[in-house]
Structures are given as C-alpha cells and as structure tokens.
Amino acid sequence: MTKITAGTKIPCRVNRTLDKGDFSMLHQLNWFNMAVHSDCEYAKGTWFKERSLAGPVIFTVADGLLHNADNIAGLLAGDGYEIFAYIGVDNMKITSPVLFGD
C-alpha cells in the first residue's frame, strides 16, 4: 500500500467544456443567483466581463470530473479506504474564475 499525502496530484482523464446551458443549470440547482452569476448585463460591468461560475459550483464540477474518472477512489483503495461521504474539505482555494468555454 502507498500512503496518500497532502498535495498529492490526481490526474483527470475526463474533459468537459462548460457552456451557457451548463452555467444556468448548475446555478439553478444550487440557488446561486447573485447578479454576477445570473445576469449577463450586470456581469459585463464586473472584472469578469461575463457571467462566472460560483465558487462552490466550481468545486462541484471539479469533484465530478475527478470522481467520474474514479481516480480518487482508486488511490484511496490502494491505502485500504473506501469513499462513503464527505466530512469536510480543508484549504481549498479557487485561484481564477470559470467562464463560458472553460
């Protein structure tokens, strides 16, 4: 068995481009309806210049890409662990916005 440590890089084999329909559906699902995420006219006046994906939604999409590829489950299984539920996420930092086409 190998021991997974903080900072372990987890490769993702799945690619997905997010379009306007994805943005709308994801924001409707979690009720993030702030103007910068839902109003294209308002968003034009922000430093984003267009609607952006809300931070918690970015985490959800990234998590879905990783789990779709079963990378995390495979790494944890090597240490004898199995995922049943999240109990927390520590030190997550979003360093740039997600915009249409990302």
Image: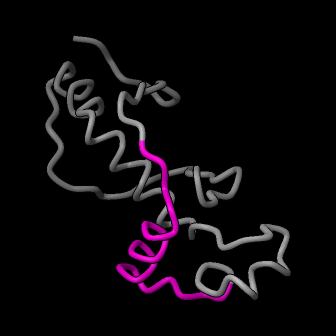
Q: Residue at image x 48%, y 48%?
A: 17
Left or right of 45, for residue 68: left
Left or right of 72, for residue 41: right
Q: Which residues are magenta?
A: 16-35
Q: Residue at image x 58%, y 53%?
A: 101
The residue at the far top in this view is 1
Magenta region includes residue 31: yes
The image quarter containing residue 74 is top left
- Using the image as rendered, state which of residue 98 and residue 59 is in the foreground: 98
Image quadrant for the N terminus?
top left
Magenta region includes residue 93: no
Q: Main secondary structure of the magenta part?
A: helix
- Using the image as rendered, state which of residue 67 and residue 17 is in the foreground: 17
Q: Residue at image x 33%, y 50%?
A: 64
4 up-or-down from 62: above or below? above
Q: Residue 52, percent across and down? A: 64, 68
- Using the image as rendered, state which of residue 6 and residue 49 is in the foreground: 49
Q: Residue 37, percent across and down? A: 61, 79
Q: How many callouts does the rendering have?
A: 0
Left or right of 50, for residue 38: left
41 up-or-down from 7: above or below? below
Q: Residue 54, percent across and down? A: 57, 70
- Using the image as rendered, state which of residue 66 and residue 35 is in the foreground: 35
Q: Residue at image x 21%, y 22%?
A: 79
